[in-house]
Image (cartoon, rainbow, N blue to C red):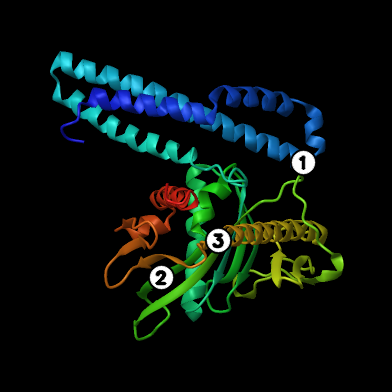
Amino acid sequence: MAGIDPEEQLKELGATLSSIEQVLDIDAMRRDISELREQAADPELWNDQERAQSVTRRLSYLESELGRVESLRQRIDDAGTLYELAREMEDEDTRKEADDELAGLVKAVQLLEVRTLMSGEYDEREALVTINAQAGGIDAADWALQLQRMYLRWAERHGYPTEVYETSYAEEAGIKSTTFAVKAPYAYGTLRGEHGTHRLVRISPFDNASRRQTSFAGLDVVPVVERSDHVDIDESELRIDVYRSSGPGGQGVNTTDSAVRITHLPSGIVVSCQNERSQLQNRASAMNVLQAKLLERKRKQEAETMSQLRGEGTSSWGTQIRNYVLHPYQIVKDLRTGVEVGNPTAVLDGDIDDFIEAEIRWMRQAESGGQ
């Protein structure tokens, strides 16, 4: 930022970080870490595998968040020292190093500030992501597979564990659908703005005439259910099918009918799970996915009812949200926030934080009525 005193900028960043620390309640975070460490040290904890994994994931997340805040505070102090040193020594190289660090700090504090905007009822939950190939034939199936890789790479970049519950492969290439979990706190609040239709424009690698093809894939994001959630599911309203898991090209993954598909007849919701060897384990995982989707459906219905009672229009993010253009030019553009990136290769390799940050701010503004 030319013309702005860098030391004043550092003071402003320090004040912003102090505000973030208040919102995040750093003291409470330290207390939670201490309690979780005690729980993690209890040998009895692992008698309940699900609870143990939840405790360790939560502990890892909080330690990472606290370390992030403390590291930023230290970096701001160190940058101030670096500017002082550059001034005293009249050294341009040191000044350049300090300027580079300041630019990095501005970006890092902005990203952390986004975390404070996630205050929705389910924002702190883990996320279940479902991707479906839509219009575009074989290109759409290939596009759905690329999107799956993009989000799994994004999670990997951040150190977030993932678990793929089900992947239905298309006959020629790509996938018909996939469902996977991002097992990190605030994964739902982070990813919920990605819900909607993603459009790809490119020269089709499957067209002998090398014609341009437009294809679509739909992405659905719901929060993972917790034990405190209550979703009534009448077993008589379920159709449960078992089948043999298969991989690309029909390659057998299992030699037994262990994969499970559950259809909730009243809503038409269909979920599948094939990642476990045991049919019982797959059924339990599929039921968890079904509960999550029914909970999100119930939440949306309640929100629509309240909006109608208030005389408000309901907003929907389940429409086309982003264009990925690889030909005749290269750009990825979000249709809601206007954010655009001229490097689709990096985006498809999981570099989507700029889009996510902007849409979290956009959703917060939309949900608060633009205030």
Badge 3 vs badge 1, beta-carbon distance below 8 Å:
no
Q: In this picture, is 233 found above or below 124?
A: below
Q: Which residue is mark 2?
A: 200
Amino acid under disc 2: Leu
Q: Which residue is mark 1?
A: 49
Q: Position of residue 208 (x, y in %)?
A: 38, 85
Say which mark, if any, is on residue 311: 3
- Mark 3 or mark 1: whose residue is earlier in sequence: 1
Quadrant in the picture for residue 128? bottom right
Alpha carbons under labels 3 and 2: distance apart:
36 Å
Q: Quadrant of the N terminus?
A: top left
Assign a secondary structure to mark 2.
strand
Alpha carbons under labels 2 and 1: distance apart:
41 Å
Front residue of this view, candidates 267 and 221: 267
- Mark 3 or mark 2: whose residue is earlier in sequence: 2
Say which mark, if any, is on residue 133: none
Q: Label 2: how many residues lie within 10 Å, few (<14), some (14-19) or many (20+)?
A: many
Residue farthest toward the right in the current orientation of the protein: 236
Q: Position of residue 136 (x, y in %)?
A: 47, 79
Q: Label 3: how many residues lie within 10 Å, few (<14), some (14-19) or many (20+)?
A: few
